[in-house]
Image (cartoon, helix red, strand yellow):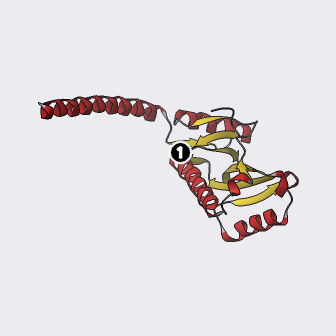
Amino acid sequence: MKKLIVAGLTLGLTMGLTACASTEKTAEAEVAAKAPDSVDLGGLSNEEATTKLLEALLNKGYLASRAGPNGVAVNFDNSQFILQPSINPDGIDRIMMNRFYAIHPKYVGSKEMLLMIGTLNQKLNFAKFVIRDQGAVIQVQGAATFVDTISMEEIRRFILWIDEGLRQVGESLPKGSEDVIKPIPVMQAI
């Protein structure tokens, strides 16, 4: 009798999960059919390119919003970034990606922070680390280059690459660093 109940539960769960899975795949397929594989930003102003990038990200299912005239705030894997198109009609176009961190007031302008930022810039090549606002903020900036058109997969991999690099930097910092350097949210309550 127990075997029959367990078999029935297993079959019921399997059928229920299969139905959920097929529903999700159908919804994903509909979104994928509507979402662009690439975004053409050539010939646009930076502000127009920002609008077009935001639309493409939203169509791909990203949690994103406008961040000023030339920025798109994106939530990716519980991290928030600002993407800023920089369109050059006669050369290479870029999407700049920025992440900002607040420095604890005790360490603002300290030699330790300057040394840490200098070391990160010397040893790493995935992003540039800059101290701003009189030593109160660390800006991390990377750039994806392209000519006119960039695929949504390239954007995804670019964000993933920067996010993973920052995760590894965070893991390499001494214990307690999370109390000294904190990410600055760029999106309103998610």
Q: Is residue 147 above or below residue 20?
A: below
Count of numbered tags: 1
Q: Residue furthest front?
A: 2
Place residue 106 in its image quadrant. Answer: bottom right
Q: Which of 17 and 176 is in front in this view?
A: 176
Residue at left 14%, top 33%?
A: 2
Residue 189 at what x, y percent from top left?
Answer: 66, 32
Q: Nearer the viewer, residue 72 or 179?
A: 179
Q: Read off the residue under disc 1.
A: 152
- In the image, 110: left or right of 53? right
- In the image, 70: left or right of 164? right
- In the image, 95: left or right of 154? right
Q: Is mark 1 on a helix, strand or loop?
A: helix
Residue at left 84%, top 51%?
A: 105
Q: Residue furthest left?
A: 1
Residue 165 at what x, y percent from top left?
Answer: 60, 59
Residue at left 67%, top 52%?
A: 94
Quadrant containing the N terminus in the rendered view: top left
Q: Which of 35 and 26 is in front in this view?
A: 26
Q: Is residue 58 above or below residue 85?
A: above
- In the image, 190: left or right of 136? left
